[in-house]
Image (cartoon, rainbow, N blue to C red):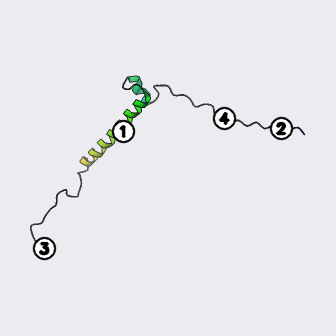
């Protein structure tokens, strides 16, 4: 009986290669295209900075708009004594 070899497709060839993104397809590419930064890594740092500023700004505005804390920041002393 002759030996039969079974050939399997490799998983990488099953769906083909993923499409390559062009330089301006995402936000980092847009920052490079517009001339704000020179490299993709610099663009990522800029976006991280923007995200941090947005979070801090949201925290500050939420605190102001919600009326602040209900806990007094200075102690309130009563002038009357309770027995």
Residue carrying label 4: 14
What span is colored magenta in the figure?
A: 65-83
Residue carrying label 2: 4
Mark 4 lies on a secondary structure that is helix
Q: Give the camera-side residue of 38 and 52.
A: 38
Instruction: Give x and y (percent) for residue 66.
Output: 26, 50
- Gap in angstroms between the C-alphas marked 3 and 1: 52 Å
Residue 82: assigned label? 3
Whether residue 3 is situated above or below residue 26 in the rendered picture: below
Mark closer to the observer (2, 4): 2
Question: Badge 2, how many Cα within 10 Å: few under 14, some, many 20+?
Answer: few
Mark 1 lies on a secondary structure that is helix
The secondary structure making up most of the magenta span is loop
Instruction: Tell me which label, 2 or 1, sits earlier in the chain.
Output: 2
Instruction: Tell me which label, 3 or 2, sits earlier in the chain.
Output: 2
- Gap in angstroms between the C-alphas marked 2 and 4: 23 Å
Question: Badge 3, how many Cα within 10 Å: few under 14, some, many 20+?
Answer: few
Instruction: Tell me which label, 3 or 4, sits earlier in the chain.
Output: 4
- Gap in angstroms between the C-alphas marked 2 and 1: 59 Å
Quarter holding the C terminus? Answer: bottom left
Residue carrying label 1: 51
């Amino acid at each position: 009986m002759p030996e039969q070899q079974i050939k399997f497709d490799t998983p990488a060839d099953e769906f083909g290669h993923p499409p390559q993104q062009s330089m301006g397809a995402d936000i980092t590419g847009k920052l490079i295209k517009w001339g704000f930064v020179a490299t993709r890594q610099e663009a990522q740092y800029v976006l991280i900075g923007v995200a941090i500023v947005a979070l801090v700004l949201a925290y500050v505005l939420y605190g102001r708009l919600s009326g602040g804390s209900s806990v007094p920041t200075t102690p309130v002393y009563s002038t009357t004594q309770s027995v």
